[in-house]
Amino acid sequence: MHSHRQGFYDKMQVWDRRNPSFLKWNEEEEGRGLGYVLEDRMINEGLERNMPTNVDIVGMTNVTQIEELGGEGGGKTRVSYKSTQTTSSGSLDVDLVIGADGGNSTVRRLLNIRTTTHAYGQLACCATVRTSDPSYRHGHTTAYQRFLDEGPVAMLPLWDGLYNIVWTMEPETARSTKSDPSGFIGRLQDGIMRGPESAGPPSVLTTITDGLGLVNMNDTSRATSSSSATPPTASTPWQARA
């Protein structure tokens, strides 16, 4: 993977809106980096580059049918699919089917695999923002999380002053926030900056050029068969996460 497009953090600061104290972890205490932040596209490209040469990848398709062939079919399972780009279709006879196609899994639905879920009644506002403070553009590897009345907000460092934002809220508040992207930066700045500080906040840009994505915070729990460094000032959302 391209190292310049990997976010890495070896420090984390966590604090609460109603408490003047904070918690902080760092790599020296844990003995390793605390985490990485990667783009889905980069992960997929890395997997494809390291895939064995005898593996065929069938992409840009939707699974339409899954059929167990039984003894006459050698115990295999036939997976039928249709292209999302053309009118073509096809099928594969396989020994193993893995339903790793997301929360609304087509594979799981076609195989009648039921799940037990718990709806948290929350949505997450997700975006990527850039700080205008040059001191946070390079080599800043602190992740921040603050617990607010609306819900926890996290800032995960990427590269070149970019941060991933995940702000969990009640659905009504999240939809209101999404409909007012011009006010998002101000709310984010107010929410993440208030609290214990050892330095004044860095400078801020007030423009916004992109929208926000919402993610449903449902948890699939079980499947059954049948330094108190001041966080950077957020500024321009760079890429919405849906």
Image: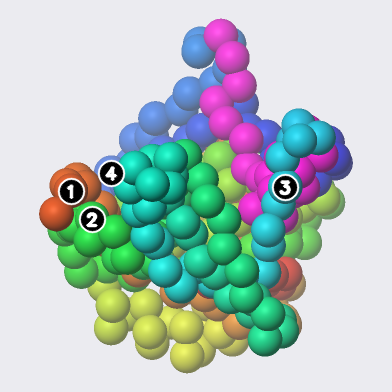
Q: Quadrant of the N terminus?
A: top right
Q: Which residues are magenta?
A: 31-50
Vertical order, 167 against 134 (above or below): below
- Between residue 142 and residue 192, name the one nearer to us: 142
User: Tag 3 or tag 2, which sits nearer the N-term?
Assistant: 3
Residue in the image at 81% along x and 35% along y: 53
> Disc 2 on helix, strand or loop?
loop
User: Tag 4 or tag 3, which sits nearer the N-term?
Assistant: 4
| Residue neighbourhood size for the residue with mark 1, other residues' Cα within 10 Å, grouped as few (<14), some (14–19), many (≥20) | few
Q: Nearer the viewer, mark 1 or mark 4?
A: 1
- Mark 1: amino acid: Ser
> Disc 1 on helix, strand or loop?
loop
Residue with the mark numbered 4: 19
> Disc 3 on helix, strand or loop?
loop
User: Tag 1 or tag 2, which sits nearer the N-term?
Assistant: 2
- Gap between marks 1 and 4 measured at Cα: 46 Å
Residue in the image at 28% along x and 83% along y: 172
Residue in the image at 48% along x and 59% along y: 79
Residue with the mark numbered 2: 113
Side of 129 where 110 appears, left or right: left
Q: Residue furthest front?
A: 72
- Gap between marks 2 and 4 measured at Cα: 45 Å
